[in-house]
Image (cartoon, rainbow, N blue to C red):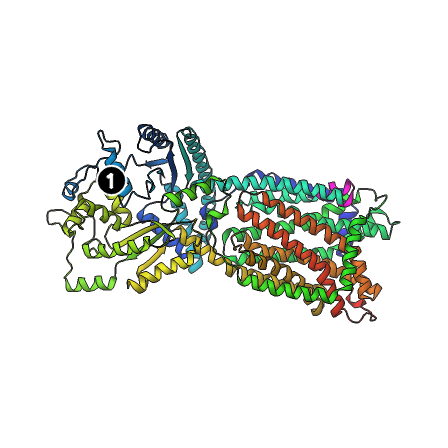
C-alpha cells in the first residue's frame, strides 16, 4: 500500500528523506541568484492585442516614443542668463551619455517669429534662429514660446515658469530585430501554426530576446541612475522632475525589489512571533519556519532556472507562498498535538504517521483547490496575471510535496512533547463562537443572506476605470512629475488618432485622371511624396484643423499636436492666411530640416496619404474615463466627420492601457466562474455528497461576494492586482471549509449529534482555522507597506476577505450544517460518510 511505503521511506528512514529534500532544494537554490525582475510595458500588455501590433507599426513609421521628460522650473526667470546657462549645462551633460541620441530643449527649437520669417524665406532655405543665436531678442522669444501653437503648453507652461527637456534615446536595432522576429513567429503560431523547425526557432529567439531584454533593462536602470546624478547637480538652481516610460520601469523594478525584501522579511518576522504566541514551543517555531523557507528557496531557484521573470503582479509571491505553506504546517502541528493528547502512550513515529495519514486527504484537497484558484488566473489573458497564476500553482505543489516529506521526517527524529500546551484563550474564543452559532443559527443565515444581497449590489457598481497616477503615492517622483506635466505642460499619457486616405475617392480620381497634385513641382527632379497626395492640400488641412480644435476642447485632453499645428504656425508667418498649395509643396520640400521635423514629419506620412493627430490625456483629471473618451472620439470622426470606419485608428499607450483595464472585468467573471465550478466539483468528489458540497461552497461565495461588494461600495476599481483577490480568497478560504467538514464527518460518526459535533470541531479544527486565518490576515496586511498602491489595496482587501472567510466558516458553515442536516438525521449512522 502507498501508506506503508510512505511510512517506510519517510517515517522509518527520516534521514534518507531529509537528504533527498536537501539535495533537491540545494540544487535549485543554486539558481536563485538568476531570478530576474521585469516591470517593462512589455510585461503588462494583453496577449494577442491587435492594437499593440498596430501601435508598434506606427512607432516604426513616425518615430520612437522611447524618451524621457525632465521638467525644469528654475528659481529665477526662465529666460534669465542663469536659468538658460543651467539649462544648457544640463542639456550638454545629458547629451554626452552613451545611449542618448539627442536632448531637445527651448534652446534648440527653431524660432520662426523671433523675428518673423516669411513663407518665401523658409522655402528659400532661411535658417531659423534659436535661443542660442547671438543677439536673439529674448522678449520676442518669450512671446513666441507662450503664443506659438506648437510650443505653448508643450515645451513651455502657460505661465512661462516651467519648461521641459526631452531626452531621446538611440534606437536599439538588435532589440527591435529580436522583438519583431519573436512576434512574427508568435502571430504565425496563433493563426496557422508552426512547423517543428519554426517552433524550435521561436523557443530560441524567445530565449535570446528575454536575455537581451534583461540586459537592456539593467542598462536602462543605469542610464536612469546617471541621469538622476546629473539632475541632482542642478537642484539648487531649479525644481526638476524626471518622467517617462524608462523612468517608470526603473522605479517599478526598485519597488519590486523593495517589496520582495520588505514583505519577505516582514512576513517571516510576523510568522515567528505568531508561532511563538500560538504554540509557545521552540520546535513549533523552528519546524514550520524551516518548512516555509525550504519551499520558498526551492521555488525561487526554480524560477531562476526557468528564467521566469518577476513582475509587479507577482512580486508578492514569496509572501503568499510563505503564508500558504504556514497554513499547511499549522494544521499539521495542531493535528499532531490532538493525536498525542488523545493517545499519549503511542511512540513518536506512530503519532507522526497517524497525523500525516489523517491529514493527507484534507491537505491534498486544500492544496488542489488553492491550485485551481490560481490556475483560474491563466484564463485572464493578461500576461503578468497568467504568470502569477502558474508561479503560485507550482509553488503550492512544491509546498505540499516538500512538507509532507520534510515535516514528518524532522518530527520523527524529535522526542514526543512532554506536555501539549492548549491555548485556553483561543479555545475559549472558538467555543464561544460555537455556542453563539448553535443559539442563533437561523439569525446567522438570515444576516448572511442580507450581506450577500448587499455584496451583489456592490459588485454591480464595480468599475475598471482607474487613473495610472493613482497607482503611486504622492511622495513618489512618478506621481509628482505626472501631476506637474498634467497641470502645466499639456498632459502625460499619449493618444494618437490615425486617419488613412479614402481609397474609393483615390481610385475615382485616378480613373478620371483629374487629380491635381500640389507637390508636382515641374522644376524638381522628384519629390518625397507619391504622385497623389490626399491630405497635404488646403481643403484637407482646413478639415484637419477643425478636427484638431474640436479634440483640444475635450476636458480630458491636454495638448494636441498635428499637421494643423504646423499650419497654424505657417499662418502666423503668412498674415493669418493658409499658404497656397504650391507654397505647401515648396515647404514640404525645401523648408529647413529642423522645421519639417518639428511641424510636418511627425504628423504626415511620407506619401501624404495618412495623418497622425497626437494628443496627451490629463491623467490626473478626476473624471477621466478612457473607454468613453476613445469611443467618443471615434464616434465623432465616423458619424460627424463621415470618415469610413476602416480608415480611422485610435492608438497609443492610452489605448493599450484601456484594453488592459477593460479586459479585467471580463477576466474577473471568467476566473470566478472557473474557480467555483472546479471547486464545487471537487467538493462533490471529496465529500461524496451533493448537499455537503453546496453547504461547503456557500460560505466561500459569501467571502468573495463580501470583498468584491465592498470594493464596489467604496469605489475601489479593479486593476491588475485586485483582479486576483476574489480567486485567491476562494482558493484559500475553501481550505477552512474542507478541514472543518472533513473533521465534522469524522466526529459526527461518534456523536450522532449536530450540536455536539459543532462543539467538538470548534474546539479542535476550529483552533487551527483560527490560527491560519489570523496568520493569513496579518500576513497580507504587511503588503500595506508597499510603494505601489494597487499592492496596498490587494493586501488590505485580501486581509478583509480572509476575515470574512474566517467568520463565515466558523459561523455560517456550522449554522448550515445544523439547520439543513446534510449528513442525515442525527440518530442515523453515518459511518459510510467517514473519510478517515
Q: Is residue 655 visible?
A: yes
Secondary-structure class at tag 1: helix
Direction right: furthest residue: 345
Q: Main secondary structure of the magenta part?
A: helix
Figure label count: 1
Task: Report the side of 410 relative to 28 (left or right).
Answer: right
**Quarter that holds the N terminus:** bottom right
Position of the C terminus by quadrant: bottom right
x then y, percent, for residue 76: 35, 31
Q: Which residue is mark 1?
A: 594
Side of 731 where 438 appears, left or right: right
Range of magenta residues: 278-289
Q: Residue at x 60, y 50 (%)?
A: 796
Whether residue 31 is visible, yes or no, is: no
Instruction: From the top left corner, tell me how far across and down residue 121 is, in percent.
Output: 15, 40
Whether residue 102 sits left or right of residue 716 in the image: it is left
Residue 470 lies in the magenta-colored region? no
> In the rendered structure, does residue 287 fall within the stretch colored magenta?
yes
Amino acid at each position: 500500500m502507498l501508506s506503508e511505503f510512505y511510512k517506510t521511506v519517510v517515517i522509518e528512514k527520516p534521514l534518507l528523506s531529509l537528504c533527498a529534500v536537501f539535495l533537491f532544494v540545494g540544487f535549485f537554490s543554486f539558481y536563485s541568484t538568476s531570478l530576474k525582475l521585469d516591470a517593462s510595458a512589455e510585461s503588462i500588455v494583453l496577449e494577442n492585442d491587435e492594437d499593440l501590433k498596430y501601435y508598434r507599426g506606427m512607432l516604426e513609421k513616425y518615430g520612437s516614443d522611447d524618451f524621457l521628460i525632465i521638467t525644469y522650473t528654475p528659481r529665477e526667470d526662465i529666460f534669465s542668463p542663469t536659468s538658460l546657462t543651467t539649462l544648457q549645462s544640463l542639456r550638454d551633460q545629458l547629451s554626452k551619455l552613451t545611449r542618448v541620441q539627442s536632448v531637445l530643449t527651448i534652446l534648440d527649437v527653431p524660432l520662426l517669429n523671433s523675428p518673423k520669417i516669411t513663407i518665401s524665406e523658409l522655402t528659400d532655405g532661411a535658417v531659423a534662429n534659436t535661443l542660442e543665436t547671438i543677439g536673439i531678442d529674448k522678449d520676442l522669444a518669450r512671446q513666441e514660446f507662450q503664443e506659438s501653437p506648437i510650443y505653448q503648453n508643450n515645451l513651455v507652461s502657460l505661465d512661462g515658469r516651467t519648461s521641459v527637456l526631452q531626452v531621446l534615446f538611440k534606437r536599439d536595432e538588435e532589440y527591435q530585430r529580436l522583438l519583431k522576429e519573436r512576434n512574427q513567429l508568435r502571430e504565425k503560431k496563433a493563426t496557422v501554426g508552426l512547423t517543428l523547425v519554426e517552433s524550435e526557432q521561436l523557443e530560441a529567439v524567445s530565449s535570446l530576446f528575454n536575455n537581451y531584454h534583461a540586459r537592456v533593462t539593467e542598462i536602462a536602470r543605469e542610464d536612469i541612475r546617471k541621469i538622476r546624478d546629473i539632475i541632482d547637480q542642478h537642484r539648487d538652481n531649479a525644481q526638476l522632475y524626471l518622467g517617462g516610460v524608462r523612468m517608470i520601469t526603473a522605479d517599478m523594478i526598485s519597488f519590486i525589489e523593495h517589496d520582495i525584501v520588505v514583505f519577505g522579511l516582514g512576513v517571516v518576522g510576523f510568522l515567528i512571533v505568531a508561532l511563538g504566541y500560538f504554540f509557545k514551543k521552540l520546535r513549533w517555531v523552528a519546524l514550520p519556519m524551516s518548512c516555509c523557507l525550504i519551499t520558498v528557496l526551492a521555488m525561487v531557484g526554480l524560477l531562476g532556472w526557468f528564467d521566469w521573470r518577476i513582475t509587479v503582479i507577482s512580486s508578492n509571491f514569496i509572501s503568499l507562498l510563505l503564508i500558504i505553506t504556514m497554513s499547511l504546517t499549522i494544521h499539521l502541528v495542531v493535528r499532531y498535538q490532538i493525536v498525542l493528547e488523545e493517545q499519549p502512550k503511542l511512540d513518536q513515529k506512530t503519532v507522526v504517521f497517524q497525523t500525516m495519514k489523517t491529514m493527507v486527504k484534507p491537505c491534498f484537497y486544500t492544496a488542489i483547490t488553492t491550485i485551481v484558484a490560481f490556475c483560474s488566473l491563466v484564463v485572464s489573458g493578461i500576461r503578468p496575471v497568467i504568470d502569477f497564476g502558474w508561479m503560485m500553482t507550482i509553488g503550492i505543489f512544491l509546498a505540499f510535496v516538500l512538507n509532507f516529506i520534510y515535516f514528518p521526517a524532522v518530527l520523527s527524529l524529535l522526542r514526543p512533547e512532554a506536555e501539549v500546551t492548549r491555548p485556553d484563550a483561543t479555545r475559549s474564543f472558538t467555543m464561544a463562537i460555537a455556542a453563539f452559532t448553535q443559539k442563533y443559527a437561523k439569525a446567522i443565515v438570515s444576516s448572511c443572506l442580507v450581506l450577500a444581497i448587499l455584496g451583489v449590489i456592490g459588485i454591480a457598481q464595480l468599475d475598471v476605470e482607474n487613473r495610472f497616477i493613482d497607482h503611486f503615492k504622492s511622495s513618489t517622483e512618478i506621481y509628482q512629475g505626472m501631476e506637474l506635466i498634467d497641470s502645466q505642460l499639456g498632459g502625460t499619457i499619449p493618444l494618437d488618432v490615425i486617419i488613412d486616405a479614402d481609397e474609393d475617392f483615390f481610385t475615382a480620381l485616378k480613373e478620371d485622371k483629374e487629380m491635381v497634385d500640389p507637390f508636382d513641382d515641374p522644376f524638381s527632379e522628384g519629390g518625397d511624396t507619391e504622385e497623389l497626395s490626399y491630405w497635404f492640400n488646403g481643403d484637407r488641412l482646413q478639415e484637419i484643423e477643425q478636427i484638431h480644435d474640436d479634440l483640444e476642447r475635450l476636458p480630458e485632453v491636454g495638448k494636441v499636436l498635428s499637421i494643423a499645428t504646423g499650419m497654424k504656425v505657417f499662418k502666423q508667418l503668412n498674415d493669418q492666411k493658409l499658404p497656397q498649395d504650391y507654397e505647401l509643396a515648396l515647404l514640404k520640400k525645401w523648408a529647413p530640416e529642423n522645421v519639417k521635423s518639428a511641424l510636418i514629419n511627425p504628423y504626415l506620412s511620407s506619401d501624404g496619404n495618412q495623418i497622425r493627430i497626437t494628443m496627451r490625456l490629463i491623467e490626473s483629471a478626476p473624471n477621466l474615463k478612457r473607454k468613453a473618451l476613445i469611443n467618443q472620439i471615434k464616434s465623432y470622426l465616423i458619424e460627424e466627420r463621415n470618415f469610413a470606419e476602416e480608415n480611422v485608428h485610435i492608438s497609443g499607450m492610452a489605448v493599450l492601457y484601456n484594453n488592459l483595464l477593460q479586459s479585467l472585468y471580463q477576466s474577473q467573471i471568467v476566473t470566478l466562474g472557473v474557480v467555483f465550478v472546479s471547486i464545487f466539483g471537487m467538493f462533490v468528489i471529496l465529500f461524496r455528497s451533493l448537499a455537503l458540497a453546496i453547504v461547503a461552497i456557500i460560505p466561500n461565495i459569501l467571502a468573495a461576494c463580501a470583498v468584491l461588494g465592498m470594493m464596489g461600495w467604496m469605489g475601489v476599481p479593479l486593476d491588475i492586482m485586485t483582479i486576483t483577490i476574489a480567486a485567491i480568497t476562494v482558493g484559500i478560504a475553501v481550505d477552512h471549509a474542507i478541514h472543518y467538514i472533513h473533521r465534522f464527518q469524522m466526529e459526527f460518526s461518534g456523536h450522532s449529534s449536530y450540536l455536539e459535533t459543532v462543539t467538538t470541531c470548534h474546539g479542535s479544527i476550529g483552533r487551527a482555522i483560527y490560527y491560519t486565518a489570523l496568520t493569513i490576515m496579518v500576513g497580507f496586511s504587511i503588503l500595506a507597506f508597499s510603494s505601489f498602491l494597487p499592492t496596498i489595496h490587494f493586501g488590505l482587501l485580501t486581509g478583509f476577505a480572509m476575515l470574512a472567510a474566517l467568520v463565515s466558516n466558523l459561523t455560517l458553515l456550522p449554522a448550515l450544517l445544523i439547520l439543513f442536516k446534510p449528513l442525515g438525521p442525527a440518530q442515523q449512522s453515518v459511518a459510510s460518510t467517514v473519510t478517515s
